[in-house]
Image (tube, grey):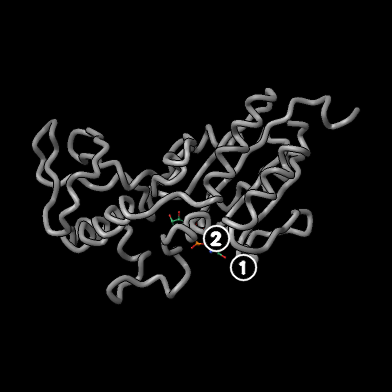
């Protein structure tokens, strides 16, 4: 049986490296510091409880960057891949750890397992609003539903559960082709998805600037900038599945 006789399903996981070429700094590059503080220290429920003004300012800076940056050829290549696969009846799923909105602005609708900077969430009533209007670093945004004084960014902090984990595990477990791009492979459960795909018999592709932690000899590794590598790599994957 040729591999074109089985139903093909392509799943892609992206990380900070895919947005690096748009000007979003990665987490573990450049020391991962903001105003001398470790990002892993700020992105926690405890930091928000203890120093909400500081955490808010950190996130408002990052939210501001959303309106100043543009998708790059990596985001565009992934959207084109999706279109090409859909036209050929091949399954596709895009999963991102990125909290920016660049995949969406390139046309994709990814599963945001770590949430989205563009969305604010009320911890009191659960209300979520898509908001990029209120970007003042000093002013909290009150909840339009219950009036609570300060909504938080709807991002998954260290110690919190990623979104849609079951859905993601199912998608990756059923993949015939899996690409991990621009992720260092150190933050779980996302870092375990590559192994899950291998275990399910998927052909695995990896793009990153540096060798990720979870790389195996089984994976086809394409080192380099995502904006330069993904256009060709996505075209090769489309051809591989006959799309
Ligand atoms: N093109 C491709 N890969 C790149 C590029 C680029 N231009 N620039 C950097 N990289 C690679 C790095 O080599 C590294 O492997 O992208 C990866 C970035 O790693 P991290 O900064 O650890 O980002 P990520 O893996 O997405 O982090 C996972 O950690 O802090 C949390 O919740 C946060 O979603 C984030 C998670």
Q: Is mark 1 within 8 Å of ligand 1?
A: yes
Callout 1 environment at 10 Å: few (<14), some (14 to 19), or many (20+)? few
Q: Percent position (x, y) of residue 155?
A: 34, 47
For residue 215, above or below residue 132: below
* 235 relative position to 80: left or right: right
Considering the image in quadrants, where does the C terminus appear? top right
Is residue 170 visible in the rendered image? The answer is no
Q: Nearer the viewer, residue 45 or 153?
A: 153
Callout 2 environment at 10 Å: few (<14), some (14 to 19), or many (20+)? few
* 123 relative position to 100: left or right: left
Q: How far apart are marks 1 and 2 (CA)?
A: 13 Å
Task: Report the mark closest to the observer, 1 or 2.
Answer: 1
Q: Which of 160 and 145 is in front in this view?
A: 145
* Element marked by disc 1: loop
* 232 relative position to 3: left or right: left
Q: Which of 110 and 103 is in front in this view?
A: 103
Residue 210 circle label: 1
Residue 186 circle label: 2
* 58 relative position to 84: left or right: left
Q: Percent position (x, y) of residue 203?
A: 76, 44
Q: Nearer the viewer, residue 179 or 124?
A: 179
Residue extending farthest to the right is 1
The residue positioned 17% from the left and 47% from the top of the image is 134
Q: Is mark 2 within 8 Å of ligand 1?
A: yes
* Element marked by disc 2: loop
Q: Percent position (x, y) of residue 161?
A: 41, 45
For residue 97, above or below residue 26: above
The residue positioned 17% from the left and 58% from the top of the image is 137
The residue positioned 61% from the left and 46% from the top of the image is 193
Considering the image in quadrants, where does the N terminus appear? top right
């Amino acid at each position: 049986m040729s591999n074109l006789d089985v139903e093909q399903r392509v799943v892609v996981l992206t990380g900070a490296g895919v947005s690096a070429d748009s000007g979003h700094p990665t987490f573990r590059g450049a020391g991962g510091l903001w105003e001398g503080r470790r990002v892993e220290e700020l992105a926690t429920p405890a930091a928000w409880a203890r120093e909400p003004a500081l955490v808010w300012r950190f996130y408002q800076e990052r939210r501001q960057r959303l309106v100043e940056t543009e998708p790059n050829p990596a985001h565009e290549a992934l959207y084109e891949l999706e279109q090409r696969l859909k036209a050929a009846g091949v399954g596709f799923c895009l999963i991102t750890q990125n909290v920016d909105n660049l995949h969406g602005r390139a046309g994709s609708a990814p599963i945001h397992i770590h949430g989205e900077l563009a969305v604010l969430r009320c911890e009191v009533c659960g209300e979520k609003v898509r908001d990029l209007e209120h970007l003042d670093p000093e002013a909290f945004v009150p909840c339009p539903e219950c009036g609570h004084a300060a909504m938080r960014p709807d991002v998954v902090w260290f110690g919190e559960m990623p979104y849609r984990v079951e859905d993601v595990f199912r998608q990756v477990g059923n993949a015939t082709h899996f690409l991990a791009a621009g992720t260092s492979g150190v933050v779980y459960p996302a870092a375990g998805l590559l192994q899950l795909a291998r275990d399910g018999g998927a052909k695995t592709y990896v793009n990153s600037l540096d060798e990720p932690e979870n790389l195996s000899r089984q994976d086809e590794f394409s080192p380099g900038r995502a904006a330069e590598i993904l256009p060709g790599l996505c075209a090769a994957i489309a051809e591989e599945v006959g799309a």
